[in-house]
Amino acid sequence: MPITDIASYPIVMQEFIEHWADVNAALGGAPATDFKLTGGYPLATFISDRATLAAIIISINSDPDLPLAITLRDAKKGAIRIRLTHFRATVAGQLSGSPYPTNLPLQPKLQEGEGRFLDPFDDMSRWWATINGDVTIPGFTPPLILQGGYTQTDFTTELAALRTAYTAVGSADDNARLARAQRDKQMKAAYERMKQYRTGIFGALPADDPLLTTVPDLTPPQWVPLNPVLLNAVWNAATSMADLNWTASTDVNLGEYSVRYVPGLAAYDPNNEILIVDLPVTALSLSTDDGLLSVGVTAQFRVYAIRTTGAETGSNIVAVTRP
């Protein structure tokens, strides 16, 4: 199979390893006669490089730190927005006639960046402190307490926890970026080695050698689908899962569908995709809570139609937020 995505690199490299071993055997099976690439690069080094790349890919795909950090942060974002709603309602109810109800901060959108999201809550904290220090409001005795006995001290603690969650996401994202950079460097080097192999092997073997007809493919033939898969996704309150439905691909060489997601609301980056499941061509729906384990969190979903040749094309991207 040719390279189609990140996960296919170790598979394709293994195909090259097996072919390379057959070539070395045909050339005599001795280190002195083995086929080598530019700079004397031998099969043993390629095998080692494959193991390194495979380990990095597995580590990135199985590392829960970033999606978990995003899930926890987004849950805290959803919870603290409820506090602002309660705050505004309580001020309007208990301090009507004062200047406070008309000067309170408005709710930020969930997709706002850290600074713009946190600003209204910093304002809320300042207004709350001002209100608690104001003994001039007729009929009101500070401090202001929200439903459930929630105090300004409780809010200060919750806001600080949200800031800590933002920091955790930043740290996990930095680590993930570094790991992806290392992975991408390894993939680029592996690609160049396989490209060298496909060219150089024709100078190492006789023109009629059967091994020249079985050189592994490196890239798939171009595939431009006539009708890309169209995805629809909605939150199902009854099952507490996202219901995904997509149109069928009419490609005669369709091999399977692959359902993937990216946590959070940032721009969809295929390098950050997390595989949910690969499904047969008869499947046109899936219910999942991947990326949606906490209230207020968002996950972006995409379905790929994958040909039997390994070529793939993605659907539209649909975001689902857990209420």
Image (spheres, rainbow, N blue to C red):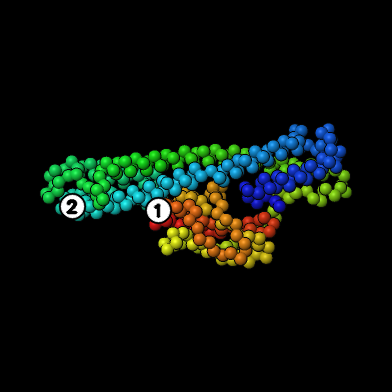
Q: Is residue 41 left or right of residue 144?
A: right
Q: Nearer the viewer, residue 180 or 28?
A: 28
Q: Residue at x 44, y 59 (%)?
A: 240
- Residue carrying label 1: 295
Q: Is residue 280 left or right of residue 175?
A: right
Dot label at residue 319: none
Does label 1 or label 2 sit earlier along the sequence?
Answer: 2
Which amino acid, by three-letter code, is at mark 1? Val
Which amino acid, by three-letter code, is at mark 2? Gln
Label 1 environment density (alpha carbons within 10 Å; few <14, some 14–19, many ≥20): some
Q: Whole-percent x and y of residue 235?
A: 44, 61
Label 2 environment density (alpha carbons within 10 Å; few <14, some 14–19, many ≥20): some
Dot label at residue 94: 2
Q: Place residue 181 in its image quadrant.
A: top right
Q: Residue at x 65, y 49 (%)?
A: 8
Q: Residue at x 67, y 45 (%)?
A: 10
Q: Whole-percent x and y of residue 30?
A: 84, 35
Q: Residue at x 65, y 64 (%)?
A: 251
Q: Is residue 260 left or right of residue 145?
A: right
What SS does tag 2 mark? helix
Q: Count of labels shown? A: 2
Q: Indicate the quadrant containing the C terminus: top left, top right, bottom left or bottom right.
A: bottom left
Q: Whole-percent x and y of residue 223?
A: 66, 58
Q: Whole-percent x and y of residue 34?
A: 81, 37
* Residue 203 shows up from this direction: no
Q: Place residue 152 in its image quadrant.
A: top left
Alpha carbons under labels 1 and 2: distance apart: 29 Å
Q: Nearer the viewer, residue 93 or 287?
A: 287
